[in-house]
């Protein structure tokens, strides 16, 4: 069993940057694919970014490509999402997810989830 806890969310102005962190406990994430999803109120959960267990491959939704960067540090069981040039449409609860397998863009494929961290982008 792996437990995930997100942090780093907050209220920022458009164009600002924010770094999200996801800490894992209960098991090592060295062999897990990791991903970030987000969900706005009354909207479906959507894929944001993912990184393979070896960190050899990263993937991004078109809406964030070029602005967000996902990374991982297996030595401390953490993954990160560096968000830059934030837009109001990035406002959502951001979730960290893990699966003991290959990267997927489908939320249903992930085995473990954090409870989310709120990101609000507003003037």
Image (cartoon, rainbow, N blue to C red):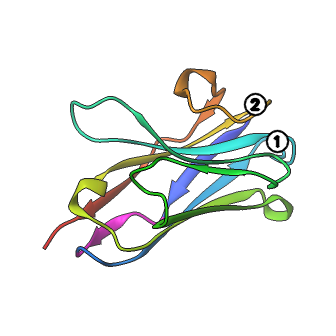
Q: Is residue 23 magenta?
A: no
Picture coordinates of residue 26, whole percent (x, y): 78, 41
Displayed quadrant of residue 17 = bottom left
Q: Nearer the viewer, residue 5 or 71?
A: 71
State the residue at coordinates (54%, 41%). Answer: 114
In this picture, residue 2 sits left or right of residue 41? right
Displayed quadrant of residue 80 = bottom right
Q: Are marks 2 and 1 in contact (CB under 8 Å)?
A: yes
Decide: is 85 above or below 21.
below
State the residue at coordinates (50%, 61%). Answer: 7
Picture coordinates of residue 49, whole percent (x, y): 55, 49
Q: Which mark is residue 1?
A: 2
Tell me the quadrant of the picture where the N terminus can be found.
top right
In this picture, residue 42 sits left or right of residue 16? left
State the residue at coordinates (26%, 61%). Answer: 120
State the residue at coordinates (68%, 62%). Answer: 71
In this picture, residue 5 sits left or right of residue 31? left
* Label located before the other in sequence (2 or 1): 2
In this picture, residue 76 sits left or right of residue 65? right
* Mark 2 to mark 1 CA distance (whole Å): 6 Å
Decide: is 48 above or below 75.
above
Picture coordinates of residue 122, whole percent (x, y): 17, 67
Q: Is residue 12 magenta?
A: yes
Q: Which residue is mark 1?
A: 27
- Magenta range: 8-13
Picture coordinates of residue 79, whole percent (x, y): 67, 58
Q: Nearer the viewer, residue 64 or 12?
A: 64
Q: Dot 1 surroundings within 10 Å: few (below 14), some, or many (20 or more)?
A: few
């Amino acid at each position: 069993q792996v437990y995930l806890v997100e942090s780093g969310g907050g209220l920022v102005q458009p164009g600002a940057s924010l770094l999200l962190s996801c800490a894992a406990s209960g098991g090592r994430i060295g062999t897990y694919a990791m991903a970030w999803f987000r969900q706005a109120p009354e909207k479906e959960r959507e894929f944001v970014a993912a990184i393979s267990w070896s960190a050899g491959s990263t993937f991004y939704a078109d809406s964030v490509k070029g602005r967000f960067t996902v990374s991982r540090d297996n030595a401390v069981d953490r993954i990160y999402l560096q968000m830059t040039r934030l837009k109001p449409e990035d406002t959502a609860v951001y979730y960290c997810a893990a699966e003991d397998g290959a990267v997927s863009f489908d939320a249903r494929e992930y085995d473990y989830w954090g409870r989310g961290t709120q990101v609000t982008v507003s003037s």
